[in-house]
Amino acid sequence: MIGYTSRGKLESAVAHGDVDAALLIPANYDASLQQGTSATLGYLGRPDSGAQQLRATIQSVAAGQSRSIAAAQLLQRQTGASFASSLARAQAAAGVVPLVQVRLSAPDGTAYVTTTGRFESGASTMLLLFIFLNSLSGASWVLETRKLGIARRILWTPTSAGTLILGQLLGRFALAMLQALIIVFGSLLFFGVSWGDPLGTAAVIFCFSLVGTGAAVLLGSLFSSDEQVRPVALLLGLGLAALGGSMAPLEVSPSTARTIAHVTPHAWANDAFSKLLRHGGDLITVLPQIAVLLGFAALTITAAVWQLRRTVTA
């Protein structure tokens, strides 16, 4: 635990990620309680699941302390004893009350067998956000090959439409994988992020990149101008990420919201990373999520191939 001498320094430490959360204790905390008055504690936290869990823990501890202090203040008023002796009696009585055991588990009931570091959960969600968002941004390049007549001139050569479409898919897929590699190795080198089982992580990234590839080519083949593509790409990239848990953790959402979130590939990929990073999972444990992501990829790529072939051969 780290102590800070001013609120400003504490807020700066939380904002810059030096600490996940902070507890603000007033300078007159002890004196206020001994005088029978209330004291307010402050809490600062980052917008991630770790800070949410710490907040619940701090609230539980503060509530327990509040009960003992309230009992001590009542004894002090009724008996005229000192606050210290009243508090000792209240704490002694609390010590013989049976405690409730609490076990932290995931929404499906499985236990968290590993603890992620400061950046793990944020790194995986941002990885998915940027793979998909940047893939959709690449839809403009698919559109350019049509607007500038490049696709038409290529088809005048012995090059088939299938080869042209395959080149578009491979180009978008290569950029998605490059984006992923930059985030994975950059976070590993500069922030010490552990990505769990290498095979499991690679499989999830590979499948999610395929989804982004299909979505990008489909989007680029549906519209006829950048003014149409860019707003839709931004809306889908951010909207699906928000719905799928890449901006706020699904663990803190109601069960209905979690169910709705799984219409997006992001939710399934986030579930896979949760297993890999928080539960010590491997490739075998994330096979269900990988299967669903491959289904999303097959759907988007099939639609993209059909629409692009229809567009360039019209």
Image: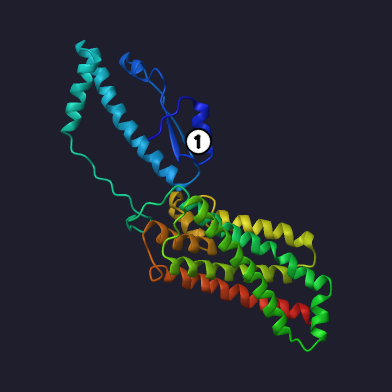
- Where, by quadrant of the figure, is residue 265 drawn? bottom right
| Any part of residue 306 in sight | no
Identify the residue at the far bottom of this view. 158
Answer left or right for 225 relative to 77. right
User: Which residue in the structure is indicated by mark 1?
Assistant: 13
User: How was the colour assigned to the protein in this rendering?
Assistant: rainbow
Q: Nearer the viewer, residue 58 or 127?
A: 127
Identify the residue at the far front of this view. 189
Q: Is residue 89 above or below residue 2?
A: above
**Residue at position x 78%, y 72% from top?**
145
- Rendering coords of residue 137 (x, y %): 69, 61
Tell me if mark 1 has few (under 14), some (14-19) or many (20+) residues whose alpha carbon lies within 10 angstroms of its own: some
Q: Is residue 251 above or below residue 173?
A: above
What residue type is disc 1 on? Answer: Ala
Q: Nearer the viewer, residue 308 or 203?
A: 203
Answer left or right for 87 relative to 112. left
**Residue at position x 64%, y 59% from top?**
236
